[in-house]
Amino acid sequence: MQSTDSVDSARQHPTALQSREAQLDPFEWYAEMRRADPVHYDERRETWDVFRYEDVDRVLRDQETFSADRSGSGATAAGTEGDGGAVLKTMISTDPPEHERLRGFVNDRFQPGALSEYRPRLEELTDELVDELEDAGEFDFVDEFAVALPVTVIAELLGIPPERRDQFREWSGALIARPESSDEEAIQRMKQRRETAQTEMGRYFAKLLEERQGGDGDDLITLAANADELSRQEKIGFCMILLLAGNITTTNLLTNAIWTFEEQGITEDVGSGDVDRKKAIEEVLRYRSPVQEIQRIASEDAQLGGQQVEAGDVVNVWVGAANRDPEVFDDPETFRPERRPNQHLAFGKGVHYCLGAPLARLEADIALERLLTRFERFDADISDLQPISGHYGLEFLHCQVN
């Protein structure tokens, strides 16, 4: 069922999610598909779409049957001129045992205990941004805070000069962008932007890795530069994927939190502590997951939800649909900030559970605490929302504070 372009075509929106309204609120479609066709083959996109929690959970856990290896997608990471754009191999696009080798050297740095030592610096960086918002009074929350904070944090962890952060944002946007439309010209423009960003990022990181080889710094680029178990291209891939995954998901988590709190009328209650902030963050992760879909490739023929999936087929699991499955969550269409239990799949499951989940939670906790306790009034305008391309979030969110 899969052509050579299937992995790329699977990144396009399903027909049901082409409109602005549907991209902002895909949940009615999810509910319909869970009931009527929970494992559905989309002929246009040449991909299976999976909607029920049980099936999504299985695909994410069963890495032997449903592979994360997307090397056939044509993703490349050029290092320096003459590298020829070697296939980008990262921790999120490989299976065990390769996955453990590519991720293992940095695992300890992202554990909650290790990150707790970084909390004072995170609070300092957050306060600096909040000071700027206070001076402005009116601002775009997405661009001036939700993007700025994670980029600043991951740049510091990597050991990147502050003056390169805007460039990082541009690269990240290009790498997750979807085609503006389904016509071939738009798809080719998207591919060109992506390839250019990958080449520029690869060369930049290759230079820093070479400079820091043998160094004793505690930044992540130095750590990668001295990781003997990784090849040169794997080190570049590590830096690139950490930059990408380290800011985009957190950006959308922060944006979706403010969007949801305003929609639900609980912004002040979260700020005052009447609503538990940490539990509210977990419910945002379930209710408006920053990543709505995850892709896998069937490595062998398999039965899934009563359907026959063939080896080589693209399988798209809809995390956002699984997180509202009434078989798992009571009253799933209602935002309940005190929800327990809350076994959402926002950070994935199994061996590919998000490395940066503890950091994303920590950033969100500090950011929302600082934002919602610092100001007497924090108003977000949710009357005219535009969906972001690629993941699930907003292009902008106009706010006023005093």
Image (cartoon, rainbow, N blue to C red):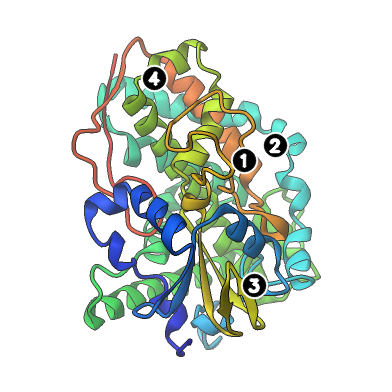
Q: Residue at x 58, y 67 (%)?
A: 305
Query: Outermost residue, left direction?
Result: 384
Residue 359 in view here: yes
Pick whichever of labels 2 and 1 is earlier in the sequence: 2
Pick whichever of labels 2 and 4 is earlier in the sequence: 2
Please state which amino acid type lies under the numbered disc 2: Leu
Label 2 and label 4: CA atoms lie apart by 27 Å
Pick whichever of labels 1 and 4 is earlier in the sequence: 4
- Please give left or right for residue 233 compared with residue 281 in the image: right
Q: Using the image, determine if residue 221 lies above or below residue 236.
A: above
Q: Quadrant of the C terminus?
A: top left
Q: Residue at x 66, y 51 (%)?
A: 355
> Mark 2 and 3 residues: CB-CB less than 8 Å, in contact?
no
Tell me if mark 1 has few (under 14), some (14-19) or many (20+) residues whose alpha carbon lies within 10 angstroms of its own. many
3 or 1: mark nearer the eye: 3
Q: Which residue is mark 2?
A: 115
Looking at the image, which is closer to me, 385 or 165? 385
Tell me if mark 2 has few (under 14), some (14-19) or many (20+) residues whose alpha carbon lies within 10 angstroms of its own. some
Q: Which residue is mark 1?
A: 359
Q: Using the image, determine if residue 355 lies above or below residue 193.
A: above
Q: Secondary structure at mark 2?
A: helix
Please state which amino acid type lies under the numbered disc 1: Leu
Pick whichever of labels 2 and 3 is earlier in the sequence: 3
Residue 77 in view here: no
Q: Secondary structure at mark 3?
A: strand
Pick whichever of labels 4 and 3 is earlier in the sequence: 3
Q: Which residue is mark 4?
A: 267
Examine the image and state in which quarter residue 304 appears.
bottom right
Q: Position of residue 388 (x, y in %)?
A: 32, 52
